[in-house]
Amino acid sequence: LGRLLTHPVKGLENYRELLHTLTTVRGAIKVFCEVAELGRG
């Protein structure tokens, strides 16, 4: 799963960056908003 999460955007306050990435970046497999660090384990 981690390899599919290709374009993290940190924080809800960066929603413009999130939308820009979703609509313009070629090769974006999975763009996601990171609201907390991903847990390991």
Image (cartoon, helix red, strand yellow):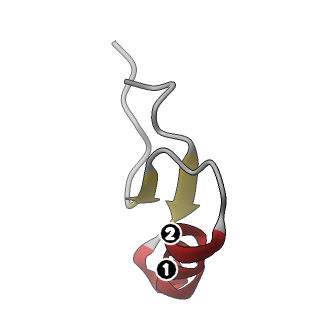
- In the image, 41: left or right of 29? left
Q: Which residue is mark 2?
A: 22
Q: Secondary structure at mark 2?
A: helix
The local crowd at label 1, few if under 14, some if 14 to 19, many if 20 or more residues have their Cα within 10 Å, is few
* Amino acid of disc 1: Leu
Residue 9, label in figure: none
Is 1 or 38 nearer to us in this picture?
1
Mark 2 and mark 1 residues within 8 Å of each other at the beta carbon: yes
Which quadrant is home to the N terminus?
A: top left
Question: With respect to residue 22, does 38 lie above or below?
Answer: above
- x, y percentage for residue 20? 59, 80
Give the residue drawn at x 62%, y 48%: 27
Q: Which mark is residue 19?
A: 1
Question: Relative to 26, is 22 above or below?
Answer: below
The answer to whether 12 appears left or right of 8 in the picture is left
Q: Residue furthest front?
A: 26
Which residue type carries mark 2? Leu
- Residue 39 vs residue 30, the one in the foreground: 30
Q: Residue at x 38, y 52 (%)?
A: 36
Q: Is residue 26 above or below residue 41?
A: below
Res 35 quadrant in image: bottom left
How far across and how far down the image is residue 21, in percent?
59, 69
Quarter of the image for the C terminus: give it. top left
Which residue: 50% across, 69% down?
22
